[in-house]
Image: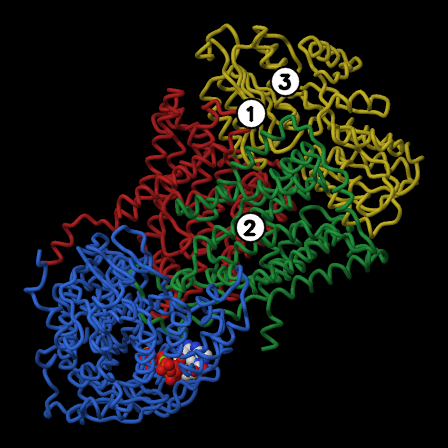
Amino acid sequence: MHVDNLPVGPLAAPPSGDREPTGAQPVVTARQVTRTYGRTRALTGVDLEVRAGEVLGLVGHNGAGKSTLMRVLAGLEACDEGVVTVRGQEVPRDVRPGAAEFRAVRMAYQETSLCPDLTVAENIWISSRRCLPRLRWRRAASAAVQRRLDEMFPGHGVVPRDRVEALTLARRQMVEIARASLVDRLDLLILDEPTESLGPDAARSLYDHVRTLTARGTAVLLISHRIREVLSVADRVAVMRDGAVVADKPAAGLSEDDVLVLMGAEVAAPADPGPAPAAVPAGDRPVIAELRAASGHGLHDVSVRVGAGEVVGLAGLAGQGQQEVLERLWRPVRKDTTVLGSRAYVPGDRQRSGVLPLWSVAENLIVTAMRGLARYGVRRRAEEAAAVRSWVDRLAIRGGADAGMTELSGGNQQKVIVARAFASTADLVLLDDPFRGVDVHTKTDLYSLIREEAANGRSVVWHSSENAEMAHCDRVYVLRAGRVVAELAGEEISEERIIAVSFAESTEAPQ
Amino acid sequence: MTNLVVAAVPPRAQLRRLAPAMVSTIAMFAMVAVCASLQSDVLTVTGLTLILSATVPLVIAAQAQMMLMSVGDIDLGIGNFVGLVTVITATKLVSSPGTGMLFLVGLVAAYALLGALIHLRRVPSLIATLGASFVWLGLGLFVLPTPGGSTPTWLATFGSWAPAGFPAPLLPILVASALVWLLASRGSVGVRVRAFGSNPVALQRAGLSPLAARVVAYGVAGALGVLAGLLLASQTGGGDVSSASSYTLITVAAVILGGGSFRGGNAVPWGVAIGGVTLGLVSVVLSLLDVPSNMQSAVQGAIVLAVLAGRVVVGKVLR
Amino acid sequence: MTLRTLARPWIWGFVASALVWATILALSSQGGGQTVSLALSLAPYLVIVGLGQMLVITAGPGNIDVSVAPVISLAGFVAVAATAATGSVAVGVLAGIGTGLAVAAISVLAILGLSIPPIIATLAAGLIASSLTLSLADGFTAVPDEGLRQLLNLRPAGVPVLAVAVAVLTALVVALLSRTTYGRSLLAVGQSRPAAERAGIPVARVLAATYLASGALAGLAGALLAAYIAPSPDLGTRYLLDSVAVVVIGGTLISGGRAVPVGIWGSALFFILLDGLVNLVGWSTAAQNLLKGGLVLFVLFLAGGGTRRDATTSRPRRRPRPATAATAATTTGDNTHG
Amino acid sequence: GSGCGSRSNDGGGSGSGDKPFIALSNGFIGNGWRQTMIAKFEAAATQAQSDGLLGKFKVVNAPGENSATEQVAQIKSLLLQKPDALLIDPASPTALKPVIQQACDAGIKVVVFDSAIDAPCAHVLLNSFKDWATAAAEPLVKGIGGKGTVIVSRGVVGSQPEEEMYKTTQEILAANPEVKVAATVNGMCDGAKAQKAVLGVLSSVPKVDGVIGCGDGYGVAQAFSTAGKPIPALTFETNGRALNYWNDSKLDNGSVAVMSDPGQSVAALWEAIDLLDGKDIPKQLTFPIVLVEQKDLGAWASALKPDEYAAWPWTQDLFRKQVEAVKTGGAPVQPPIPSAAN
Ligand SMILES: Nc1ncnc2c1ncn2[C@@H]1O[C@H](COP(=O)(O)OP(=O)(O)OP(=O)(O)O)[C@@H](O)[C@H]1O
Ligand SMILES: Nc1ncnc2c1ncn2[C@@H]1O[C@H](COP(=O)(O)OP(=O)(O)OP(=O)(O)O)[C@@H](O)[C@H]1O
Ligand SMILES: [Mg+2]
Ligand SMILES: [Mg+2]
């Protein structure tokens, strides 16, 4: 779900004119900062200034260099050239994590930086040990994180002695944010895509807290791909493109389209999902996969049908059973699930369950199709090469077939993983929210790929946390608490409608 | 309000985490029960002393193995290392205690150095410790080619210490496990070590040194290995570099039985104590049962499989 | 790029064996060619076991087969008994392979059925195998087949027939890994088990096949060794540690996903020549162990490193799932897990 | 198939006064010698049981590698079962000292065999390692005519018996200055290891006339045939495989077969029974090694299975005679060579 999709008012107090922080002290400044990784120029000369008491929004396409810049601003990495000053003091070049200059700059990471095997309190000790007593630190850390979580996310449900592993994704994100803010003195708080895993209530209370922080003079740097969210929270918006800040403007007066243009997008693309798919009634298609009143393992009486050549969406708030449905279809071992034909899976968590890191693009791409192409278990390399070539061309995968998979940018890696599934002969392709954090251009390419493949008779089951994406589906099941609360088809599918059913209390637990 | 509710709910995740050690505990008591039914004297202080004493060095060596497994490493050299310590104990520590102590401290330092090299050169611990095990063996043979020597009197006295009303071997097991627990599970040093095993990136981002964490883990493992060697020497009354070679794999099994994992991030000192005692008791059960001599290793293997299978079953039930 | 290739550890096995060979030659100033020839007649056994161990290690973190030693011993007895009973060497060798498969089947059941970590599962299977070995050895009467022994000793033009056969086997394993779906699947599983699973690879089947292959190869080695030496309960004892060591010195990634079958030859030759050197010089076992361990560590620390990216700068992972640790962030050359 | 059993009708065994309960702890079961040793013991003990000399017996082998720690644990649990006598084939000559003392303190008669051990309370029964080394080297040196090149294959270097044996070998070699040592390898008294070790040096040494070993001749012979060299004079192991090979290959070049006697376990059984009877037996008994010479080769070869080691068939009677011989310093008893029927 997207917070900016909510049909409710602004998330936090709108930035008002009198808060214009012109006179405020700069907390952290970057001047002509560059950073290269091998042949990648991640930062090509960034100028940025974060001032006390403001919320600075930072947007940019994937790989624009946002996270890299943040690592430099937080003192985790030194820059190659340029100058970083913290509170007017120039930072030495050979900076290491934990350097004294950066004590008051804290960052909540895009991917949480908690230790899953440790308890919440122990994780707090690791990052906030300087403001904890030497003895009885466990108790102090528990109390501190409990208090901070209560402030930031009322009703969070996190117990400090829980192991992080046992927490849901949203709770982990809460702990990550609380962890970052727990310090004796906080000048700058960097939030790198903090709301990706949070629910709307949690996001709202986070931004409320952000306001109380800025009121105390702390600067907050907010990175997000949800532009409406950034616009509603930030005082100032900086746009990054290809390793440099290309624009830095007050948020007031900027529209979403303005920002998209600054980022280098053709604005028409995301707004118009193409011709609405013909709403073929599901009954007319042969059913190739079905869940009949499936229960257990997080599902309650879920019935799902997938017709041949149909794109079926699974929508709703994150973690309401969509992944469980995909899991059942992927491994149909129970009696209540039937799947005719072969399957392919596109994971959303590409680092863990997508990328085969030692291999090239070609090898990654073909590994699923290989089995179908092979004769008696022996590969047919000419056919494989042809398939790879056509898919690399079709999706314009930058780097080409022979590039190492880990040398690719995230979006291109995701293309390979999607291509892997569609290059196979699978009749049913399962998409597990694969387009999170993928930039707009790549997304549009992949949307049209999905439609094309469906037109060729493949079935797709597509879980997405972005409701706008569901417009590309023939039918959408909206899940809540492990139940199907609505089935939408054709024209009925709209963000507003999905949000309505996702949140409507009346639809919950119809018994 | 939610906090209260959550706190009241039975911590199922925690239960699941403790399940392996619980199964091993049950197995341990079952084994004691079997022994006791075959030989009622087992439950007397002398009986417990007899059946537990041989497990003492094993448990402590298993704690050393656990320290390394908590950073995601495996030590294939611990058996020969313990053997080397017995050799030094039986020779240098007797002839000149000062030099002997220096040697033992040097061994701990060597372990820490090994950890540092593994970290800095980014080599797999499995193969590095395998290589080191050849070195420990060679050093042991070098110092004492023939098993022999004698233990310092204080150590021998400790080895034959038999307090009334209390099985003496329980003391070192409990003390060592409690120390490891304080260090690795409660203390901040342990947090660093486990954090390194769990997510080294997080550790580094917090400005802590992964190298230090690994070196500490190896250093503690080395110290525990020295302790295990001292206690083994106190029981065998001499040095023999190959006397503990079976520890290498058995300690890994003990950690797994105790609820540890190969993934790193976990420290389970009490579970390891139980797993070590369980494995140590297998020999006792085998000698009490009239198992045909050829079949004894098969029974040992079957017991290990059965305990771990029990774990799986309990895990399924708890899920 | 070339520097990286040079740093690939598999070269070091060959370099080290060449050094040891040169030392032997310098010391004895005779029989240089014959030294290699004789080493080549001993190396194949270790290479066979090593190939199986390599497949297992390639299957990813935590995979190791510690049952190879007892399997070799057991298969030796079974093969000799079967040969004596049927009069056919082929049946004997097949029986040895079958023995390896049977023991591996126990491991597979424990690993896949009971989710027992491989090091423990194979340890237990090995214990069971050693009991069977002892039972068989008790009053064992059969003698190894003379014909097979002569075949194993055959060295036309100084090239052992067995070495050629095992070289062919190595080539087959190379082809298996690069040309077959099984091989590619194994490499994928070794790189990332969850990713392989999501890519539609039948992970359980691949793992089962891998352990069975290791068992079969250990069984084959046992059958041949029993004919070459003699069946004995400790026939395989030395092969456990050595098989792991040759695989890793041979350049196979201990964290899985990359196998270097050819490298095994280099490190196997190194170990065998080192034994020869130590015996020639008359060093004690203490020195022998120190040298072996020292060289393993030296090669390891010299060749190691470079594959793992610095932890702070590694590419961020987008969405850790609740069930997963964040440790997978660094992907190549990561620290090992058994 | 064999097993250890409690076939006694005497349930408790301990302290019940009538027939004794004897336990054997064996530190290692992984080679043919130890297996023969256990098999001989179990056969003799079963027989003694049915003859009414023994109430109950039990054999415990430490599983796995030669592990003193396992054996300590097992002896401790045997102590709980209160045997009247404890026979020990130790995994380590030192590691068992404290536990043996513990057993003695518990009033148990302890007989250690196969290895010397420095435990004053225990009775020790063993073969002379000096005799062994002499019997291995002397006929061989004579066989090659007192001159030529030999390889010395050492046993388990580091063990105390090996030191003694190596010293003896060196003395014999010193007395024959024309015999040159081309290489000294570590054969570990194990045919397989010796085979590899000798093969490793064969290409680098000149023509070899003999290999003075420690019961590893069969493996060494394989090494020579692999290298395509003539089989020199060897020291064979005393098992059926080696003896048959020696017999079949008609080697008559000074080769011998010599090893310690796995029948020691049986002798130790008789010693324990006599000790429990209160007989006076010296603390240390040296029993004859098993030396197979060319003349007895056929008889031994036909009596042994491949992996069975030649063992003297000690009876209670022969045992007592040998004890007398030790006491009086007379010539050692020469038990009969077992026939194939055994
Ligand atoms: N450790 C690294 N090694 C090599 N290249 C890197 C590394 N970190 C980042 N890069 C590269 O630097 C560029 C900037 O990456 P960065 O993570 O800063 O992007 P981002 O703007 O945060 O993207 P996203 O919106 O996807 O989070 C990318 O091309 C990326 O691939
Ligand atoms: N970790 C890395 N190591 C080496 N090269 C890298 C790495 N990450 C990125 N690159 C190189 O940098 C290039 C740019 O990557 P970047 O992430 O900036 O792409 P991007 O424009 O964000 O694309 P996408 O939108 O698909 O993520 C990649 O094509 C790749 O060649
Ligand atoms: Mg990118
Ligand atoms: Mg980023």
The residue at which mark 1 appears reads as: D25
Secondary structure beneath label 1: strand
Secondary structure of residue under mark 3 = helix
* Neighbours of disc 1 within 10 Å: few (<14), some (14-19), many (20+): many
Say which chain is green: C
Q: Nearer the viewer, residue A100 or A54?
A: A54
**Separation of residues labelled 3 and 1 (CA atoms):** 12 Å
Residue D188 on image: x %, y %: 70, 39
C298 in relation to D215, above or below: below
Sort mark 3 into few (<14), some (14-19) or many (20+) by Cα contacts within 10 Å. many
Q: Which residue in the structure is indicated by mark 2?
A: C213
Question: Which chain corresponds to the colour red?
Answer: B
- Marks 2/1: CA–CA distance: 38 Å
Is the same chain shared between marks 2 and 1?
no
Tell me which numbered mark, 3 or 1, is placed earlier along the sequence.
Answer: 1
**Residue A485 percent location from the top left of the image:** 13, 64
Query: Label 3: which residue?
Result: D268
